[in-house]
Amino acid sequence: MIAVLVLAVPVGVFIGAIGIGGVLLPPALTGLGVLDIHAAAGTSSWAFLFTGVVGTLAYARHQAMPWRFGGFLTLGAAPAAAAGALVNGILPATALWIFLAVVTAGSGAFNLWARPRERRDLPAPAAVAVGAAVGFGSALTGTGGPVLLVPVLLALGVPALTTIAAGQLIQLPLVGFATLGYAAHGNVHFGLGSVLGVLAGAGALLGTRLARRLRGRHLHRVASAALVVVGAFLFALPFLPR
């Protein structure tokens, strides 16, 4: 339990600084024997509401939140997440995680060695379409929005800071609906999740400060390298003992 609580802070730092990192918390809760896999996912979803709110407010406070762009992404993500949740029960879990690992690591490698031309954001129809794909994929794999949003937007040339800030916003409806679904089956430990959320939220606040201090090029490289590492972790995750 102490190890999980300590881990919550760096997880929050990763979420605030590069948009991803929350995917590390559920395996820690199960691997350390704190919760079973369903309760770990539900409790983590509740904790990520804290980091999403903190990250969104922090980027908004410094006028770095792309509200219009993030709104279009969310508009596509919210309804598509319901469809992804339905398909989730049909496909094998191992195949889903391997797919997520390939997308994450592949995008990170692509952005490191063949950086696309930067653009400010995407046109509204494209943003809604990307949001729908991310919402569907996130629900399909049981992950938060930034895990898929960050690699997709970076590969499309959206600046790293815009990408990471939008990831804070898009995760709110996704983890919100996920929490309701898990809670309906009694798989959310709100006490533990709240403690984890507060600790991770503090880390996310620090992470947003780190992200704003890095130059765009450096932040892009840091985020891309992190995607490669997380992708390798996701590839190994289905084969780890539970």
Image (cartoon, rainbow, N blue to C red):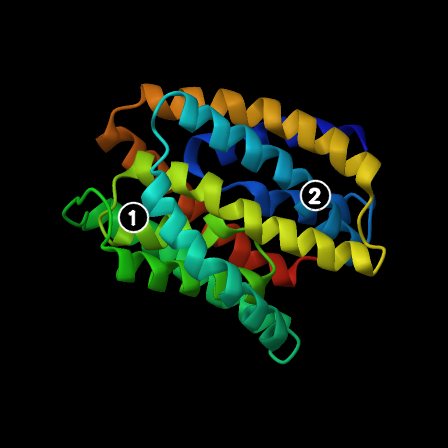
Residue 13 visible, this angle: no
Q: Give the class, few, some or many, for how many residues have Cα within 10 Å of label 2's Cα (few <14, many ≥20).
A: many
Image check: 130 left or right of 170?
left
Q: Where, quadrant-wise, is the N terminus in this rendering?
A: top right
Furthest residue to the left?
A: 117
The residue that mark 1 highlights is 154
Up/down of 19 relative to 178, above or below: above
Q: Quadrant of the C terminus?
A: bottom right
Based on the displayed image, in which of its 4 quarters is residue 163 positioned? top left
Location of residue 227 in the rendering, given as x and y in whole percent from the top left corner = 41, 46
Q: Quadrant of residue 132?
A: bottom left
Residue located at (72% from left, 59% from top) = 181
- Residue 157 vertical placement versus 200 (above, below): below
Q: Nearer the viewer, residue 217 or 183?
A: 183
| Residue that carries the numbered disc 2 in the rendered image | 46
Q: Quadrant of residue 106?
A: bottom left
Q: Residue at x 42, y 27 (%)?
A: 59
- Label 1 packing within 10 angstroms: few (<14), some (14-19), many (20+): many
Determine which of the numbered discs, if any, sits on residue 115 in the image.
Answer: none
On the picture, is 123 further left or further right than 103?
left
Q: Is residue 167 above or below residue 3?
A: below
Q: Give percent across and percent down for residue 216.
A: 24, 30
> Residue at point 70% right, 51% down?
179
Total number of numbered discs in the rendering: 2
> Given the image, on which type of amino acid does mark 1 rest?
Leu
Asked which secondary structure carries label 1, the reply is helix
For residue 226, side relative to residue 117 (left or right): right
